[in-house]
Image (cartoon, rainbow, N blue to C red):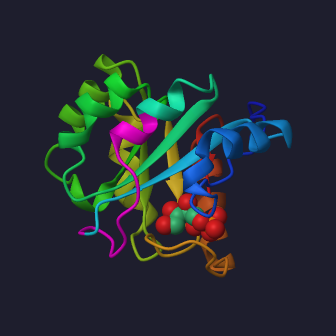
Amino acid sequence: MVGVMAKIAPSMLSSDFSNLASEADRMIKCGADWLHMDIMDGHFVPNLTIGAPVIESLRKHTNAYLDCHLMVTNPLDYVEPFGKAGASGFTFHVEVTKDNWQELIRDIKAKGMRPGVALKPGTPIEDVYPLVEDEVPVEMVLVMTVEPGFGGQKFMPEMMNKVRTLRKKYPSLDIEM
Ligand SMILES: O=C(CO)[C@@H](O)[C@H](O)COP(=O)(O)O
């Protein structure tokens, strides 16, 4: 078992978006390793949150790792703008990339970001195996323990079975939840 250090990546979804830079500083001062940025398009999920311009503005104020979770129907459209904006991680959903995840991973890496894949609670863990085992793999799997689209939801403990299965199969894989 390769030692995998745990990281703290608080979602900024419930922060005061009118003071994002100071909220980001506060999170880092409180011990956050990454800042988790929930990007929602109002189509893949009902909510609409922030886009590349906000990431670009925040990047001017922090060197923190911006761990972007793209809850969007067409993630390929967001790679260029998020790469230019200074996003660190780009995690897309497996549910909407059945046909183009290989192109997407290569594009994300070409833009200097770290590729990750997320799966909803109802999606079987096996659906991400090809993306983890590809010759150009994702570098992280986000196991959703809530339905995507809203903050403040109740943790779904049954999702921990997916985490245990992933950890057993891929001892050194970065797993986010
Ligand atoms: O992707 C999501 C929800 O869509 C997660 O990043 C978190 O659920 C965000 O909010 P909190 O639950 O931490 O308040």
Q: What percent of the width, then of the height, locates residue 34? A: 66, 37
Q: What percent of the width, then of the height, locates residue 37? A: 52, 48
Residue 27 in the image: above or below residue 40 = above
Residue at 18% x, 41% y is: 77
The one nearer the camera, 70 or 47, is: 47
Residue 37 in the image: above or below residue 84 = below
Q: Quadrant of residue 55?
A: top left
Residue at 60% x, 72% y is: 159
In the displayed structure image, the side of residue 99 where residue 167 appears, left or right: right
Residue 48 belongs to magenta span = yes
The one nearer the camera, 174 or 28, is: 28
Q: Quadrant of residue 122?
A: bottom left
Residue 39 in the image: above or below residue 150 = above
Residue at 18% x, 32% y is: 103
In the displayed structure image, the side of residue 83 where residue 120 appears, left or right: right
Residue 157 belongs to magenta span = no
Q: What percent of the width, then of the height, locates residue 166? A: 57, 53
Report if residue 102 is visible in the image. yes
Q: What percent of the width, then of the height, locates residue 25? A: 73, 37
State which quarter of the image contains the N terminus. Answer: top right
